[in-house]
């Protein structure tokens, strides 16, 4: 079943990057271990080669095939990092894996615009390398806003961050930064200079904390006054880095803030989900529902709600035990997810054996049609439980959400329609008209 065709409401998701990982490593043991580890952790195909000659042939054959390269600095036919020159020259983001490390080597690596380097000299080398590659791949999903009124310094920082694979957006003033944050809710991290003519970094930090409380902010400044870092932190920044940067320090501080963001998102995701079925829970439905209805309204579209309840569920519980009941709930949830989740719909488990679906863009007639399809599909599906084939049915109450009506009021009306469906014999869809 298709969600209502309301392109204006559909979420844009970027396409998945299918490119692989290229490993240039002459030690066979390392190369094999790396390939297994990287494939398991990233799910991407890994190609290995052991010399500059093989590398050049691979790149010439398929220059655009690699999302990232891992390069050993010393190869028999490329002892001075020539393999690194090749990957960088061909625009392949590169992580260096090296056994030799001294200041001269670091200098040679850093002047070549690499993502990072990982030392081979310790027992954690392999997991460190895999972690670095994973982080770099993940960075492509993080948008960072760089705020600095001086174009050249802003460009240098933006370039450093794009080498780390972050998606970088630039602002030349505090006001522009605030406007960009308003326009792009996916901007998650701000790196801001202190001195700017229209508003300084402290004021920007205070404003961002108030208007975008989930955004992380790192202050930067070339001031030698230690109070600048304290001022940034007191204004609400999460971190501070002094100019001129030690590149590795800046990388680590940004990575640690991105990690915090990732953990926060994971917690938010867990808080929004129902543990048994992994569907969205009641809290999420009521937190997100009103805004979703509002976007439909603004696009001049209707919205409807369906409340769905499993028929005679108590009997199933009594007969097959609570665990059996749980399995039925999970099966119904998976069916509903397949039939009604995503696109412009919001599906949630809102009670023990009750599920709600918000149909954005659907008026009552359309919501009735969609609900009828869901009811039929669930009734058609047989579920095997304790050696018994269960005929599972659901009853559904549907209503259209009134203009400026509260979501709980609409859900209450859908509940009355559901009650009518139960009274009329179950396994059916009933509608409740809006009160005028
Ligand atoms: P009706 O057809 O009128 O909806 O009857 P019913 O038996 O489905 O409804 P009733 O409300 O009498 O029973 C619902 C049962 O769902 C009662 C409760 O113990 C059970 N239940 C609620 N949450 C869960 C759960 O998470 N797991 C299991 N196994 N049972 C649950
Ligand atoms: Mg029931």
Image (tube, helix red, strand yellow):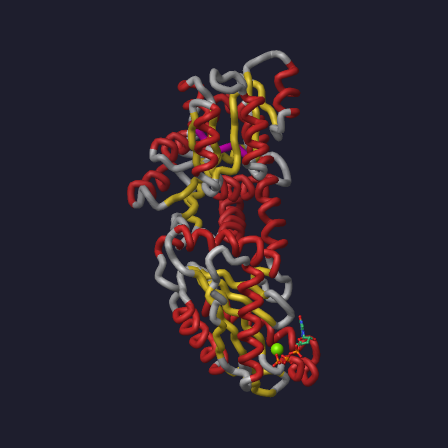
Is 103 in front, or is 184?
Answer: 184
In the image, taking residue 333 as reference, residue 345 lies left or right, namely left
**Which residue sits furthest top?**
224
Task: Tell me which residue sits at (63%, 84%) in the image.
Answer: 386
Decide whether residue 118 is among the magenta residues: yes
- Can residue 80 be seen here? no
**Residue 388 x %, y %:** 60, 87
Q: Position of residue 71 (x, y in %)?
A: 45, 37
User: Along the line of sight, which residue is nearer the eye, 283 or 170?
Assistant: 283
Which quadrant of the rendered structure holds the N terminus? bottom left
- Specify the farthest residue to the front: 436
**362 left or right of 42?**
left
In the picture, residue 79 is in which quadrant? top left
Residue at 53% across / 80% down in the picture?
A: 421
Provide residue 269's location: percent of width, then percent of height: 58, 52
Point 58% across, 33% down: residue: 210
Is 414 situated above or below 178? below
Place of residue 429 in the rendered image (x, y in percent of width and height, measured from the top left): 48, 78
The residue lying furthest to the left in this view is 61
The answer to whether residue 152 is seen in the rendering is: yes
Ligand 2 image-quadrant field: bottom right
Q: Which residues are magenta?
A: 113-119
């Amino acid at each position: 079943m298709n969600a209502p065709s309301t392109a204006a409401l559909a979420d844009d998701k970027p396409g998945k990057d299918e490119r692989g990982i290229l490993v240039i490593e002459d030690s066979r043991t390392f190369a094999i271990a790396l390939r297994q580890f990287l494939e398991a952790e990233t799910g991407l195909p890994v190609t290995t080669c052991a010399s500059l000659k093989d590398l050049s042939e691979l790149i010439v054959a398929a220059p655009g095939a690699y999302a990232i390269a891992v390069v050993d600095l010393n190869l028999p036919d490329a002892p001075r990092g020539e393999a690194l020159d090749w990957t960088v020259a061909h625009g392949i983001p590169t992580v260096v894996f090296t056994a030799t490390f001294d200041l001269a080597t670091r200098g040679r690596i850093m002047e070549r615009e690499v993502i990072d380097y990982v030392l081979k000299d310790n027992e954690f080398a392999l997991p460190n390398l895999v972690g670095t590659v994973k982080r770099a791949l993940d960075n492509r999903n993080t948008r960072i806003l760089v705020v600095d009124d001086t174009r050249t310094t802003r460009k240098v920082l933006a370039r450093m961050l794009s080498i780390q694979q972050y998606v970088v957006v630039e602002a030349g003033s505090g006001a522009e930064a605030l406007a960009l944050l308003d326009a792009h809710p996916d901007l998650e991290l701000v790196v801001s200079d202190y001195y700017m003519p229209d508003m300084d970094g402290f004021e920007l930090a205070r404003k961002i904390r108030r208007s975008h409380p989930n955004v992380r902010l790192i202050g930067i400044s070339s001031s030698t006054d230690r109070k600048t870092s304290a001022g940034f932190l007191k204004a609400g920044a999460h971190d501070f880095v002094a100019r001129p940067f030690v590149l590795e320090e800046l990388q680590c501080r940004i990575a640690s803030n991105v990690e915090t963001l990732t953990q926060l998102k994971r917690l938010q995701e867990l808080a929004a989900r129902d543990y048994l079925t992994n569907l969205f829970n009641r809290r999420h439905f009521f937190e997100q529902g009103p805004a979703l209805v509002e976007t439909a309204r603004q696009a001049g579209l209707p919205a409807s709600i369906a409340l769905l309840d499993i028929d005679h569920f108590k009997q199933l519980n009594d007969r097959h035990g609570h665990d059996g009941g749980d399995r039925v709930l999970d099966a119904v949830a998976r069916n509903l997810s397949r039939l009604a989740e995503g696109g412009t719909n919001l599906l949630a488990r809102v009670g023990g054996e009750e599920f709600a679906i918000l149909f954005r863009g659907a008026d009552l007639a359309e919501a009735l049609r969609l609900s009828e399809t869901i009811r039929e599909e669930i009734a058609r599906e047989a579920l095997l439980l304790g050696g018994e084939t269960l005929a599972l049915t659901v009853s559904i109450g549907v209503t259209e959400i009134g203009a400026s009506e509260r979501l709980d009021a609409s859900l209450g009306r859908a509940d009355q329609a559901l009650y009518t469906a139960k009274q009329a014999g179950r396994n059916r869809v009933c509608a409740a008209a809006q009160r005028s």
